[in-house]
Image (cartoon, coloured by chain):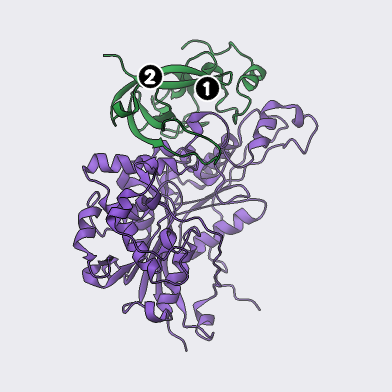
Chain colours: A green, B purple
Amino acid sequence: MRPVAALNDHEVFDRYPDELIDHDNIDHYRAMAERRLVIRHCQDCGYWIYPHRPICPECLSENLRFEEVSGRGTIFMETRLHQLRDPDASIVEPIVAAAVELEERTGLRYLSRIVNCRIEDIVLDMPVSLTWIEEDGCIWPAFEPAAG
Amino acid sequence: MARNPLKDQVAVVGVGSTAYGRDQQRSLLSLGVEAALKAMADAGIDRRGIDGICGSGMSPLAVGNAGFLSVQGALGIEKVTWGKNGWLGSAFVFAVEAVFSGLCDTCLVVQSYRREVNMSRSAARDPFRLRASRFGETGGMGGRDFARRWLHSGEPYAAWMKRYMHDYGVGKDAFGLMAVNNRSHGARNPDAVIQRAITLDDYHASRMVWEPMQMLDMDIPVDGAEAFVITTAERARDLRQKPVTVHAMSLGGTRVGEFYENTLPWTENAFWVAMEGLWARSDLTRTDVDLFYPYDGYTIDAVAVVEAAGFCKPGEAGDYFRDCWDRRENILRLNGGRTLVTTGGGGLAHGRSGGSNLYAEAVRQLRGSQGERQARHADSALITIGSMYHDPSAVLLRAGERR
Ligand SMILES: [Zn+2]
């Protein structure tokens, strides 16, 4: 595991000014700012823990480490948003919200956007891989069709 | 002297505490699970013995923090039949109520507190406490992180709809027929905000919102309210209305917690847990149900409840609805024709009141007071209200007797 000490806590809060950052997830955002997707991994039973929890929900161990995931996964479910709640928001084409099942564990899903892909080409269970986008000065993970 | 049937009936068997400190640099959830683990160890009960959770918070559905959803997820407790939040003195009393009533046998109470920014000047300078205070009990909803977009969102219901169609190789007829049924009943209900019946073609032609979910899959937002007075069955016999009694109840909770994209498989979602909890407490079975009110916030909810209640096999609601379809009235008739579904029109036609109008309609039908709309068979009603992701109810009501 690479060290996750590049930004101090105050810098992480500054990089992500609008998110609920707490002691259980700050390392996730700290790594995200460096374009690395990290998730807690139980050092005792090997369970990948997401959403972020203070202990391992599988074996109740506290011996956890944030580790980088491979970024490979498949689309478990997705919906295309033709309408947003804000009545003044305009959508040129539907926004895709996809739950990507990461290869590290069955049921480990990360909600994300799908980019670099025509909407009509998106199908359930299609392989995708991690990429990064920048929006309003923040760095966010996104997924794109896997190469090959 | 007041009634006290719970006298000496419920006991405290485990206690757990964390250290107290001005700055523990831990989340509320982290503190809560430490206390919970210690209390379970003190009681000699492991997490498989817990079937109810009272979490921390002033809001019934606090997401994040040490609310009951997050506590269940963090402790990996597979199934509970009761969940609620409480604070100050209320949490303890809620848990005793739940155990006494039989909604759960062993309840975990988790109460987590922090030095809030409005309690201390140094706390007001701590970025963790400041950020937490901004979000309150919303678990981080309303930020820009797309990964938290499905915290208490409707969009994952649309995504499940697509997954359901994909896994079972079916179209949208189950959803469409449920919508047609409710709108047909709504057309006979003078109180419904939408009184126009629809056809399956109307359903398929409606505007796309969250693909594949369409306008006619979604309940109608309205301003409105329902209220109920609940007392003992003993007292009810002397009051002016024919009583309607609660035969059995259950809430359903799964270890998934509040990030909906991490949902369990279809047949393990919270509706299945709630229905299992109900049947385990009920003398009646599915075939005894005269009236059925599956929650219709979205049609996918209602389809899930039908399947979770065991009316048909998973994925087969579409075929089942066709078999049960009354072509003359354009409504569903289950249990060999006797059982009507969502008389009154529910959220899709009468209007959205979070399912409370389903309880109200069921009570009036069981009283036999619905006039022209009165169902012929109305001795029992199954009402299942809520989300496949968190704490849905399953309630069996029966017509009672006046003295
Ligand atoms: Zn573990």
Give the vertical position of A79 relative to B250 (above or below): above
Mark 1 and mark 2 lie on one chain; the one further toward the N terminus is 1
Tell if the residue under mark 1 belongs to the same chain as the one under mark 2. yes
Residue B154: give x, y in percent of width and height: 45, 44
Residue marked by disc 2:
A116
Q: Please name the residue shown 47% across and 70% down the image.
A: B191
Residue A49: give x, y in percent of width and height: 44, 29
* On-image quarter of the C terminus of chain A: top left
Q: Is residue B314 left or right of residue B232?
A: left
Residue A140: give x, y in percent of width and height: 50, 21
Identify the mark at residue A28; answer none if there is no mark: 1
Of A49 and B19, which appears nearest the observer?
Answer: A49
SS type, badge 1: helix
Of B232 and A88, which appears nearest the observer?
Answer: A88
Q: Residue furthest right?
A: B121
SS type, badge 2: loop
Q: Is residue B107 left or right of residue A124?
A: right
Q: Is residue B201 left or right of residue B255?
A: left
Identify the mark at residue B185; answer none if there is no mark: none
Q: Please name the residue shown 60% across and 27% down the image.
A: A23
Circle 1 or circle 2, nearest the eye: 2
